[in-house]
Image: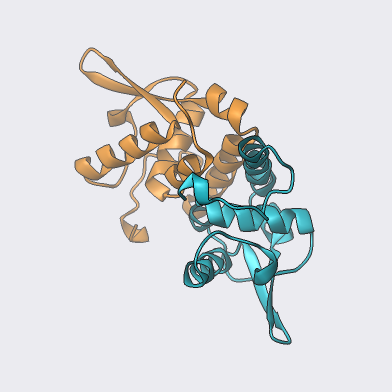
Chain colours: A orange, B cyan
Amino acid sequence: MEEIRLEAVLHALADPARLEVVCFLARTEGEAACSEIDLAVSKSTGTHHYRVLREAGVIRQVYRGTAKMNSLRKADLDALFPRLLDSVVSAAAKRLRRDQGTTSGARRSRAHQGE
Amino acid sequence: MEEIRLEAVLHALADPARLEVVCFLARTEGEAACSEIDLAVSKSTGTHHYRVLREAGVIRQVYRGTAKMNSLRKADLDALFPRLLDSVVSAAAKRLRRDQGTTSGARRSRAHQGE
């Protein structure tokens, strides 16, 4: 496995849109297409966020037909940084539920947040 | 307490020099002067790193006489983001021990790392 650096993982997680992708994938516990994860950002910004996550080693991206499928590298991350991913996902999910008054999380508008 | 945001904390931790400060303070379990924490960066860069940590809510800084004393806001962080700080400090400390072949951590030269 290519090197996964702690600082790169923390940097990748230090963004609300990227945290949203990570929380979505943590809930999914499998692969999800980018199109399933409804980020309130432009397509090019979204592509940038997925690249940061992939290059940091947080997610894996594979093509299945024409769809780019994303999954968390949970086993790799848990082995290298025990409890880190779970603690970040828990904190982000708790905040999302509080902010949104919903447990659905990803599929919502964030226009009012000015993010 | 002023708001502590998850993304700001993750961003503050996503830097090797700032992680070193955090690991040092975690080991110290109390206050430490900036001068006790031997970062291999310029004074102005060091000041910047401490400010990022303070503004994110990771550390508290107070003046005692002429010394600026730093301490981790561990209780605040643990209450907001359970296990996050411990998991990051453990991962960073493990990496430091592996990289340095020492358990002393902070007081060493990092010139060879090009950081």
Q: Residue at x 51, y 40 (%)?
A: A103
Residue projecting furthest to the bottom: B65
Query: From the image, which quarter does the C terminus of chain A lie in?
Result: bottom left
Q: Residue at x 68, y 55 (%)?
A: B107
Q: Residue at x 33, y 49 (%)?
A: A109
Give residue A45's position: percent from left, percent from top: 25, 45
Q: Is residue B62 above or below residue A31?
A: below
Within the image, what quadrant is residue B35 found in? bottom right
B112, B18: nearer the viewer:
B112
- Left or right: where B47 falls relative to B64: left
Q: Residue at x 49, y 67 (%)?
A: B42
Q: Is residue A23 above or below residue A78?
A: below
Q: Can residue B13 be seen in this snapshot?
A: no
A33, B73: nearer the viewer:
B73
B89, A44: nearer the viewer:
B89
Q: Is residue A113 above or below residue A90?
A: below
Residue projecting furthest to the top: A65
Give residue B70's position: percent from left, percent from top: 68, 69
